[in-house]
Amino acid sequence: RAAIETAWPGIELLVLPADPAGRLPAEALERVDFAYFSGDVYPDYSRSFFAAAQGAPNLRWLHTFNAGVDNPVFRRFLDRGVVLSTSSGSTAQPIAQSVIGGMLLLARPFLRWAAAQRRRAWEPVPASEAPADLAGQRMTVVGLGAIGTEVARLARAFGLAVTGVRRSPRREDDPVERVEPPGRLEELARETDWLVLACPLTEETRGLVSERVLRALPRGAYVLNVARGEVVDEAALIAALRDGHLGGAYLDVFATEPLPPESPLWELPNVVISPHNSAVAAGNERRATEGYFLPNLARMRRGERLVNEVR
Ligand code: NDP
């Protein structure tokens, strides 16, 4: 509250409870000019918030805790002329750490050790089955933004050679060897041991990782997806994992969420699953509020362009 007062002295503040069972009456937001949504997009309470905000006659700006705004609920605000900004960046560190954690689980024999541990079995991995050295392997990061850049930075510390994929050209401080356009993905896949997906879901990226791209990866390569399930052809991914073309995957996002109990992904060996939860970390809300919402509130007051404004 005090920080909001500092960013915009005298602003009137309405704090809505984050009551997951609650329903928000449409009138609640009638006088609101700006809204900061710091919840989760999917629960019922959020749906009632978005419905009320949709109808708020004075709403001019919506700032959201989310980084990805592919959910159609956000498009409706943009279509109405409401300025939309995100907190993209606030969860980049924990997500990148989850990606690296997934990589290490798959690259080192943790899954095998853990299975033996549960049987109280002392089963060293023999030298004849030693995993490949991680240092010197090649990673391709599709979507070299807040998350992808942090993944690349950490991966390089493990000695991987990292290529970034995005539409805009290389910047001096990009922690990658090179930046290539998405049109070259299939070609790049041929020399990729670790394919990391960290791009937004857009018309261009839906199905970007097609069966052709998956099959272009060398045998034994890995897919790590923290972007959106629809970026990958999930049926082709399952087939490539099943027939051993892929060595494994770390998946946080799926074509259908929650991942249905009948999905074969649950039981495939060498698949590590997190329930769209790779970002979970105690500091996220503070990072989103202090790093993005409050600075944007001050910018809004000064009539300046917002950070992370969605166009
Ligand atoms: P950023 O906006 O910082 O980065 C997105 C990157 O993707 C940019 O480098 C952008 O570069 C690139 N990009 C856009 N279009 C394409 C394309 N067609 N092909 C290749 N690259 C492309 O976003 P974040 O890093 O914060 O988040 C990325 C995505 O991760 C989010 O949109 C969301 O879907 C997902 N996410 C998932 C979370 C989870 O819990 N698993 C949590 C947070 C985000 P350019 O424009 O130059 O192409």
Image: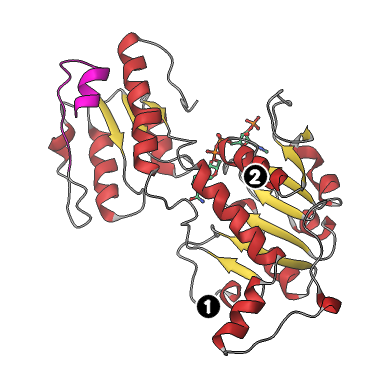
Residue type at mark 2 is: Leu
Q: Which residue is mark 1?
A: 262
**Place of residue 203 in the rendered image (x, y in percent of width and height, measured from the top left):** 61, 41
Residue at the outermost top position: 302
Is residue 80 rendered to the left or right of residue 167? left
Q: Residues within 10 Å of mark 1 (few under 14, many from 20)?
A: few
**Place of residue 161 in the rendered image (x, y in percent of width and height, measured from the top left):** 79, 44
Secondary structure, mark 1, is loop
Residue type at mark 1 is: Glu
Is residue 101 in view from this perspective? yes
Q: Write the residue at 72% across / 81% down.
A: 124
Contact check, label 2 and label 1, Cβ < 8 Å = no
Asked whether mark 1 lies closer than 8 Å to ligand 1, one says: no
Asked whether mark 2 lies closer than 8 Å to ligand 1, one says: no
Question: Magenta-highlighted stretch: main secondary structure?
Answer: loop
Q: Which residues are magenta?
A: 1-16
Q: Which residue is mark 2?
A: 154
Q: Quadrant of residue 77?
A: top left
